[in-house]
Image (cartoon, rainbow, N blue to C red):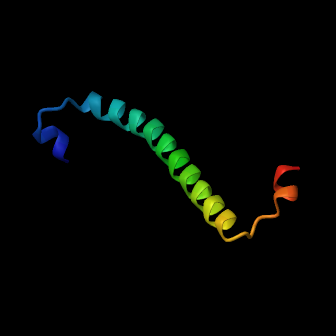
């Protein structure tokens, strides 16, 4: 709705949607990696991880 008012051609909307899908996948990977890293750091600091099992 906003792009036509900014004089962006209709064809570019499809291109933007395709690029956004790829960028969204990378954002999701980054978010998951951050959550897992934070969980492991907190669990290790609370001594809740059995390192023998973790490294095997």
29 lies above or below 12? below
Question: Which residue is at a point 72% across and 69% down the rendered structure image?
Answer: 47
Picture residue at 17% right of the left edge, 46% below the top = 2
- From the viewer's perspective, is residue 45 above or below residue 16? below
> How many callouts does the rendering have?
0
- Give left or right: position of 36 versus 1: right
Side (left or right) of 21 relative to 39: left
Q: Is residue 49 found left or right of 21 in the rendered image? A: right
With respect to residue 21, does 51 lie above or below?
below
The front one of 1 and 45 is: 45
Q: Position of residue 44 (x, y in %)?
A: 69, 63
Residue drawn at the location 81% of the way across and 58% of the way down: 51
Q: Quadrant of residue 12?
A: top left
Which residue is depicted at the point 45% across and 44% down?
24
On the image, the x and y values in percent for residue 20 come to: 39, 39
Picture quarter containing residue 40?
bottom right
- Spot occupied by residue 13 in the image (x, y as percentages of width and height): 29, 35
Q: Is residue 42 left or right of residue 49?
A: left
Residue 6's spot in the image, x, y percent?
11, 37
């Amino acid at each position: 709705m906003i792009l036509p008012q900014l004089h962006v051609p209709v064809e570019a909307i499809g291109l933007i949607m395709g690029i956004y899908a790829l960028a969204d996948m990378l954002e999701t990977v980054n978010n998951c990696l951050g959550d897992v890293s934070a969980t492991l750091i907190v669990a290790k600091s609370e001594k809740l991880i059995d390192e023998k099992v973790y490294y095997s």
